Amino acid sequence: MSEDLPESEGRARPRKAPTAFRTISEVADDLHIPQHVLRFWETKFPQLKPLKRGGGRRYYRPEDIALLRRISDLLYTQGYTIKGVQRLLRDGTDEGPQAAATGELPLGDPPPAAEEQETAALRDALAELEAIARDLRALAA
């Protein structure tokens, strides 16, 4: 019977069924993520909607916990930004049949071609402004 009571920070907690709902403190302990971060993620990821009961207590479903694991992996292991994870979850770009079959994740957020073109245009404009500034300094001297 003692096998069913894992020790967690000095207090015994009965083991729940895999389909049972979890409180925010249980999820935070299991995922090693502070509770305030879980609450913040709820504001950033609309797909994450734990059940809220009286007094605003959150109860996470197994699918919520799976999504939290996914978000945590993308942010902390894969190195995505919050916007990058939002895009992946919104577009479903990492949820395709190939990703599901291989279990692989994309390595990062490559900048879109438009951003690369904009960066190049900004560099050109900066170089032109620096040349004008050099010319003005030479005239003033």
Image (cartoon, rainbow, N blue to C red):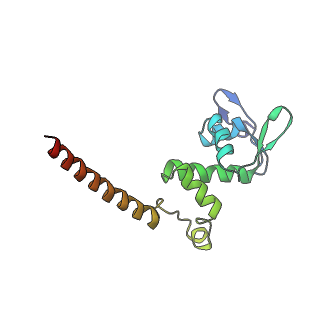
111 lies above or below 43: below
- The tally of labels here is 0
Considering every residue shown, the one lying at the far front of the view is 139
Front residue of 2 and 103: 103
Q: Is residue 113 left or right of residue 26?
A: left
Residue at 65% from the left image edge and 49% from the top image edge: 68
Image quadrant where one finds the C terminus? top left
35 lies above or below 10: below
Residue 110 x/y as whole percent: 45, 62
Residue 3 x/y as whole percent: 70, 40
Residue at 53% from the left image edge and 62% from the top image edge: 105
Which quarter of the figure has residue 92?
bottom right
Residue at 51% from the left image edge and 47% from the top image edge: 76
Q: Is residue 109 left or right of residue 27?
A: left
Which quarter of the figure has residue 86?
bottom right
Front residue of 5 and 18: 18
Front residue of 139 and 85: 139
